[in-house]
Image (cartoon, rainbow, N blue to C red):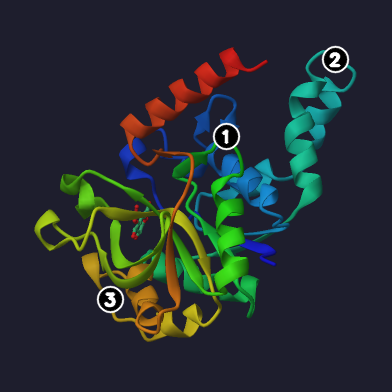
Amino acid sequence: MITKCLFPAAGYGTRFLPATKAMPKEMLPVMTKPLIQYGVEEAVEAGIDVMAVITGRGKRAIEDHFDISYELEHQIKGTSKEHLLDEIRELIGKCTFTYTRQIEMKGLGDAIHKGRVLIGSEPFAVVLADDLCHNPDGDGVLKQMAKVYEKYRCSIVAVQEVPMEETSKYGVIAGKTIDDDLFMVDTMIEKPDPAEAPSNLAIIGRYILTPDIFELIERTEPGKGGEIQITDALMAQAKKGMVMAYKFKGRRFDCGSIDGFVEATNYFYTLGQTAP
Ligand code: G1P
């Protein structure tokens, strides 16, 4: 069973400046919920109850969001607006939040390594809240991946097909086809140019990692952009056949970009209009 989920949330969100000058990008709302809340809900649905957040300077709003706001609760108690807090209250009641700070930005691999103190030595999930996922027809993406983990007991990355000209935005994998939606990874490259990309299967921000990843990250040299890349650390596991890539069911919105963010907003707005 996977019981812990890591949320790397120390990044600056420069693409959304000035909105993210004083507010964490993970708190940008799609409709009425901040991005990170969608991620936490997805983790809870997958049976996870410990949310381990890697924060940084200027990210305190995340901690406050997953806490009681006494003044506000007192103000709206007994009014017609009280129900607006029901959902978040219920969510907070279902999980524990732990936090540590990444002091310097040294890449996603480094951010995940900072989470070692919160995770310990068990397999864990990773959610990049920028990637907002939704499956209207069944299990959420993390729950789908947890099921794959139960069967294979190795690291799992979520992948989706992207246009070849976009490979330089993602970690890209190639591997042996196990099933329609499952591959045993043998190659993974961080943000390759289309000419060097081994396929068009791009990693999106959902991972299940086995805890040996922490030591592999320690041995990983800075890669693309001079940063410690999780993709490079995972390659050491992939060489032993211990990484599966899972083509998930559902939609994924790149809410780290303006286009993806607007698309997600329109999608959830329309969904709200058509819900029973
Ligand atoms: C990170 C990873 C990349 C992955 C992407 C998914 O990149 O390094 O391998 O494909 O997340 O969103 P970032 O978007 O942080 O640059």
Q: Amino acid at mark 2?
A: Thr
Q: Secondary structure at mark 3?
A: loop
Q: Secondary structure at mark 2?
A: loop
Image-quadrant location for residue 119: bottom right
Q: Nearer the viewer, residue 7 or 145?
A: 145
Give neighbour class at mark 2: few <14, some 14-19, many 20+ (Cα, 10 Å).
few
Q: Earlier in the sequence, mark 2 or mark 3?
A: 2
Q: Residue sitting at 76 percent across and 45 percent down?
A: 92
Q: Residue at x 35, y 36 (%)?
A: 16
Amino acid at the residue labelled 1: Asp
- Name the residue beneath numbered marker 1: 137
Q: What residue did someone put label 2 on?
A: 79
Percent position (x, y) of residue 174?
28, 65
Numbered label tally = 3
Mark 1 crowdedness (10 Å alpha carbons): few <14, some 14-19, many ≥20? few
Residue bearing the label numbered 3: 222
Comparing labels 1 and 2, the label whose residue is closer to the camera: 1
Q: Is residue 40 left or right of residue 85?
A: left
Name the quarter showing ligand 1. Answer: bottom left
- Classify mark 1: helix, strand or loop: loop
Residue type marked 3: Pro
Q: Which mark is residue 171?
A: none
- Residue 58 horizontal side relative to residue 69, left or right: left
Residue 207 visible? The answer is yes
Q: What x and y, as percent, mark residue 81?
A: 78, 17
Q: Say if mark 2 contacts mark 3, CB within 8 Å.
A: no
Q: Is residue 65 left or right of residue 95?
A: left
Q: Position of residue 276 (x, y in %)?
A: 68, 15
Q: Earlier in the sequence, mark 1 or mark 2?
A: 2
